[in-house]
Image: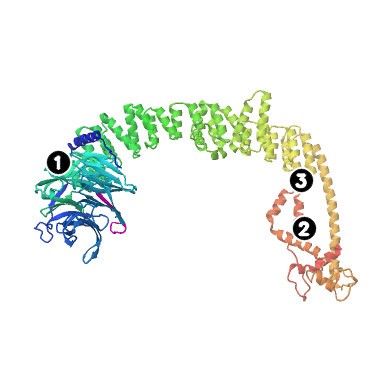
Amino acid sequence: MSCHVSTVSDRKARNINTMAAFLQWRKFTFFDKETVKDPLDSGKTFVLPNGISACDSGRGHIVLGDISGNIWLLMRLLQLTTFQAYKLRVMHIYQLKQHSILVTVGQDEHGINPLVKVWNLDKRDSGSPLCTRIFPAIPGNKPAEVSCLSVHENLNFMAIGFTDGSVVLTKGDITRDRHSKTLILHEGTSPVTGLAFRQVAKVIHLYVATLEKVHCYSLSVKEYPKVELDTHGCALRCSSLTDPSQDSQFIVAGDECVYLYQPDERGPCFAFDGTKLLARWHRGYLFLIIWNTKTRFGSRESCPSDKQLLTIYDLDNKFIAYSAQFDDVIDVVAEWGSFYVLTRDGKIYVLQEKDTQTKLEMLFKKNLFVMAINLAKSQHLDSDGLSEIFRQYGDHLYLKGDHDGAIQQYIRTIGKLEPSYVIRKFLDAQRIHNLTAFLQALHRQSLANADHTTLLLNCYTKLKDSLKLEEFIKSSESEVHFDVEIAIKVLRQAGYHRHAVFLAERHMHHEWYLKIQLEDLKNYEEGLRYIGRLPFEQAESNMKRYGKTLMHHIPEGTTLLLKGLCTNYHPSGDTAETDSHLERSLLNKANSEEFIPIFANNPWELKAYLEHMIEVDPNSPQGVYDTLLELRLQDWAHEQDPERKKILQGEALSLLRSDNTVFDKALVLCQMHNFKEGVLYLYEKGKLYQQIMHYHMQNEVYDKVVEACKRYGDQEGCLWEQALGYFARKEEDCKAYISEVLGHIDQNNLMPPLLVVQTLAHNSTATLSVIRDYLINKLQRESQQIEDDEHKISQYREETAHLRSEIQELKTSAKIFQKTKCNMCNSPLELPSVHFLCSHSFHQHCFESYADNEAECPTCAPENRKVMDMLRAQDQKRDLHDHFNRQLQSAHDGFSVVADYFGRGVFNKLTLLTDPPGSKPVGNLEMNLQRDLLIRTKRNS
């Protein structure tokens, strides 16, 4: 299968373009030429063996084949090793670059019978490399001379070209006979002059060049389809394959042009005139040897050794890297980092490439900066090196006056060169356009700082280029990066408020947006609307900042927004600031007390705001209730209409009764506004009963004074005493009030009579008749109390005498136990039994079962414990002086408290009764008092 890819018109157009380009190519000397010297004798030139017929390089050596059938291996130190490969001659050599495999074509016999031998250079057979395979190179039944040879690096393909126009393809392991098969891939009438394998990914192609045509076979497809790339070919050894960096293109060097081919089409061509003797591609360079005398195919070995021109082309950068004449070149090979030219007179010339920096300096001297840049890129120079070239190129153009071109080169240094180096050069007003372009590029690469942003915006404003300014601020963040806040400041300062507002809104700089809208543009409606669209935290902070301004200009709208902000805030609108569903589900509520200062000059709006807050949220902060109370009291104090004033009074009292006001603050407010009902309510709420009575005393409302005593006298008894003193100081006729007060004092025994008399003695209108009834009743009760006390005293004396007699009887006479029944089980007593002085008797087993203490009567034990507890309590309270003083001060009758403490023995030491002398002492209080307890128990029974 064959097809023509390029038309004649296409070829002509390409040739014309390439020839025009070639005329502009410059020549340089980027290589140093030296003759290789003999390492054993540095004064002599190294000489190759005679009769070299083929050569190649790779794997650290140069391989040479001669007309005697020998293979020579030239090492780096110019050491030669040899072995006999053929009996007659070596015709072709192919050294694989990735394997130590050498493929040769030669003759062991006279005639046309070439043999292909595969050598493994890593293995030895009798001192020579191991020959792993030998097979004849015959295209079909008719013998033909081998014209060219190519082997794929995967060792699975080998192609042999013949002078009869056929190509034999060996597929499989080329190092073994049984794992490969051979077939005739190509047949024709024109001798095959070049073969090359190309592999990209898993696709393998084979280029075939003849004297007349160029073909390409696809070896990855079973049928091996063929594409005819061109209708003219090249001479022997005038084709090669570029590096993968050059897309592995097939080079065909014709007498007029050099063509490059892809697998399916012809690529660019270069008009390098002259008869081509050799074409090689090494490390990005095209090596061409041109001989002006045309020769026919197969006649070159017998041609005279005329001078031949070696030219090294850099096709990417479009220049000639080196050019020199040589005598009859055998081949050009690349090894050990250099290029070697082998000539038939046995000499080797080494072409050592200059380092990149040297080449760049040569270009700089000629001001060829564009070429230097292209060269640096092809040599993979680092970014710092490239930046330095761009800087030098920019400086060169700047000195020439080409400021537009210079700024383009400086832009390419961004990221490496300090921006101030460029900015200083273009600060002149005439070059502001160039400076703007540089600053724009600096921002596009996100390397601008705040100063650069300021400078760029100033350039826009100086140029009054609104379109560029809008384009800059409206560009996406992926295109241009800059300090937004700095940009807003510069635009605001320059008077571009509309652009500044756009920038602030787009980048959500809420504070700047509001500052410009409210302070510069005075657009209060838009500012309020914008705050209502913000998230809760932003809306809260901005209302605190601008609330007073907005309240002054838009009181109703501001109040409405504050009501929402302090209850359950949700942003309005469908902007990018709208909260997510999750945030909306949360309760966003600001502290309503913090916004009260905003209403400083708007009392009506403040009152509406506060009333809304306590209605919606009864748990509003304390300041809300206090401020609302103050507002209501102010309204009440200034109201003249009685009906309206009564309504306002009720509102104020209802707020006081809500239990949400602070007592002290509310009391001060009510006193400031002379709100009587509120003051009295708070006094009563705080249990300040004396303050209530003093309030009525100050206002001289006698009925209210007596009413307060009646109402609160039970909680605070001193009110009656204070009332008596108050009326006693009045010179008016207050006999009725004094009599009523004395009646309560006498009834509750609140004051000693002497103190009453002394109190009333200060009143000139109070006569003896006022207190006569009080004194008579008091004296009668005192007389009755004295009689009762004397009766109790005589009774206690009798009981004491009786107890003493019983104690004396127990001490001096025997006790007869006449009990017949057990006090525990109520059964007749039987011995053994237990008897106590308290006249209780028990069976011994009953006593042991129920008694807690063998020295104590089980029946009397509970009563005894009560007595002992009373004694312990008295003992513990002997030192409770503070408690005694408090009781004494708070009691209506202090004498009774003192008498109670005397009766409990607080002021006496406890006298313990001991056993008679000679008896066994008891070790604790309970045992010492046992006898008295028994006597007391008997008396009670």
Chain part drawn in magenta = 167-179
In the visual, does 710 lie left or right of 645? right
Upstream in sequence: badge 2 or badge 3: 3
Q: Is residue 119 above or below residue 887?
A: below
Q: Position of residue 324 (x, y in %)?
A: 12, 46
In the visual, does 822 lie left or right of 542? right
Name the mark nearer the viewer: 3 or 1: 1
Q: Residues within 10 Å of mark 2 (few under 14, many from 20)?
A: few
**Residue closer to the observer: 610 or 437:** 437
Q: Position of residue 66 (x, y in %)?
A: 15, 57
Q: Secondary structure at mark 3?
A: loop
Q: How much space separates mark 3 and mark 1, taking CA atoms?
A: 150 Å
Q: Is residue 868 visible?
A: yes
Name the image quarter holding the N terminus: top left
Asked if the residue at tag 2 contacts the one at tag 1, i.e. Cβ–Cβ closer than 8 Å, the answer is no
Upstream in sequence: badge 1 or badge 2: 1
Name the image quarter holding the C terminus: bottom right
Q: Is residue 293 above or below residue 615?
A: below
Q: Secondary structure at mark 1?
A: loop
Q: How much space separates mark 2 and mark 3, taking CA atoms?
A: 23 Å
Residue corresponding to mark 1: 274
Q: Which mark is residue 903?
A: 2
Residue corresponding to mark 3: 752
Q: Amino acid at mark 2?
A: Gly
What is the tally of numbered marks visible in this picture? 3
Q: Secondary structure at mark 2?
A: helix
Does the magenta run of residues contain 174?
A: yes
Q: Amino acid at mark 1?
A: Gly
